[in-house]
Amino acid sequence: MTQRLLGPRAMQRAASIAFIVGFFLLWEAACVVFSISPFVLPRPSAVLMTLIERFPALVPHIVQTLMTTMIGFAAGVFTGIVLGALVGSSKIAYDTAYPLLVGFSSIPKVAVVPIFVLWFGSGTVPAILTSYVICIFPIVVNVATGLATTSPEQQDVLKALGASRREILFNISLPSAMPYLFAALKVAITLAFVGTVLSETVAANRGIGNVMMIATSNFDVPLVFAGLFLLAVMGVVLYGLFSLLERRVCGWASRGADTPLA
Amino acid sequence: MNTAQNTPMGRFDDAAIVLEDTAVTYGRGETATRALDTTSLVLRDGEFVALVGPSGCGKSTILKLAAGLLPASEGYVFVGGREISARAARVGIAFQNATMLPWLSVRDNIMLPLKIVSPFKAGYRSKKATEYRERADALLAQVGLDGFGDKYPWQLSGGMLQRASLCRALIHEPRVLLLDEPFGALDQFTREELWGILQDLWLDKKPTVLLVTHDLREAAYLASRVCIMSPRPGRIVEDRAVDFQRPRTVARTYDNDFIKLMQDLRALITHDGPNTVGSAAS
């Protein structure tokens, strides 16, 4: 049996890889069999060729998009944690601020890009701001929820020992909010890319979004897909990084049925 | 010592916990619920007192008062000679749920009080590695969890978690130990085993223990005094000394005099007529 050869985890991983490879093979085959025009759907091999050929020219755009996203994300995480801590610090703050937060977060972020462009002109600033606002809300909401739902009995144990609010925050509330924070970080990093690319396609002269925009108007469809592929890779790599960090920091949350987060 | 005759504590020189005309009312106005009727209770230093009563009678309220987790609506609460107001007096506490922090190892969970309570707090960073670890491990060994310090709470069974919870309540050697149905969720055999462990721990350091339970056999086995409470709003209707020789054994709980005691206590809980309740809530 293969299972004995690889073990369940390795099997799972092999299956995932096979699935991805299979997806691209199927795509390639479909393009050939139905003779789909490369202007509609280029073959993956063509996309890959384009990517390799144009890679040196794409590097500054990759750097631009990555940098913009990371700045927006970092600022968003910082603001999100601070706001989330404020909102989650008390029941009253939570109940007061929640409706406004939900209102803000339900605004489609596409709609704010023109406003940022109006305020700051086209370029890097609106892209940073878009990725910033787009990733704040999931973090605020999750951190606030994580802090607000700390087990009262765990707090009682510390209170009975005469612990200060600060000691309770650092020993109970913050650690127990960690799984919520990491769940939010993983959502936020992918959203931050969305924000950057969104803004880049509307108003920028650099970045992957801009490259794709120009490629579209030139009917350079393989390049458009190469851009998509690059975005997917960056997103997956960063998501993976945070998953790894999550497993190190709060692996306890995904183990056993004993955790309060089950 | 006759220095403080006028203070309530003056009357009880060796008192560890004093409730003086204490009452607790939740809410206010028309929706107010009286959780605890005017109650006075004194636990002398080193005493083991069990509070028994029907559910919702306010036993846990008394425990929360002594832990400083709940302010008294009326009257006073003294723990260790000081009035409990906003801040608690570093008591040890254990609940029905073990409430271990899942992100810490069992040893780190047990060492948590040393991180909070002075004078241990000051040395936490420097002594954590050696002295405090040894202390935690020794306590773990005492409750039969030798070598489980590096495990995480989710790797332990309910009974093991409850043992660890006892360790955490005792690591800073508190003079007062508050137990809120600590064995309530355990099976009978585990529970009886833990009675023995708790009795040993108590005989070892003789802290003052307030045990809230609804198990009469547990109360009679462990306590040197059993207080029976009336239904809500609760008040103490009977205060009975339990003089059986220690250490007590589980087999002892099947002897006639033991069973007789339990029957007496049971009758007090189930047939508590209105004539024994006395003055009602004002």
Image: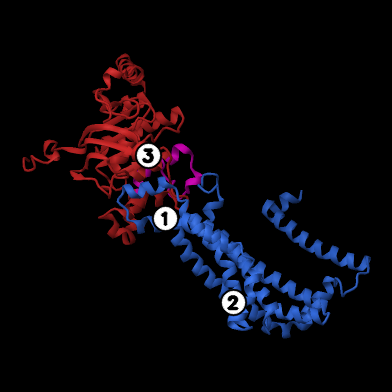
- For label 3, the crowd category at 10 Å Cα-Cα, with few meaning under 14, some 14 to 19 and many 20 or more, is many
Looking at the rendered structure, the kind of residue marked 3 is Val
Mark 2 crowd level (few <14, some 14–19, many ≥20, 10 Å Cα):
many
The answer to whether residue B7 is seen in the rendering is yes
- How has the structure been colored for display? by chain
Residue A212 vertical position relative to residue B178 in the rendered view, above or below: below
Say which of B174 and B255 sits in front.
B174
Q: Which chain is red?
A: B
- Looking at the figure, which quarter contains the C terminus of chain B? top left
Q: Colour of chain A?
A: blue
Of labels 1 and 3, the one closer to you? 1
Q: Please, which chain is the residue tagged with disc 3 on? A: B
Image quadrant assignment for residue A69? bottom right
The image shows residue A161 at horizontal and vertical percentages of 31, 49
Q: Which residues are magenta?
A: B136-161
User: In screen coordinates, is B248 left or right of A47?
Assistant: left
What residue is disc 1 on?
Answer: A90
Q: Chain of mark 1?
A: A
Question: From where the camera sits, is residue A67 visible?
Answer: no
Q: Viewed as shown, does residue B154 lie left or right of B50?
A: right
Do circles 3 and 2 both sit on a common chain?
no
Q: Residue at x 42, y 57 (%)?
A: A89
In the rendering, at what x and y percent does residue A77 appear?
Answer: 52, 68
Task: Return the residue at label 2.
Answer: A128
Checking the image for residue B143, the label placed there is 3
Above-or-below relation of B15 to B137: above
Mark 1 → mark 2, Cα distance in angstroms: 31 Å
Please indicate whether residue A258 sits to the left or right of residue A191 in the image: left
Count of marks, rendered view: 3
Q: Residue furthest left?
A: B2
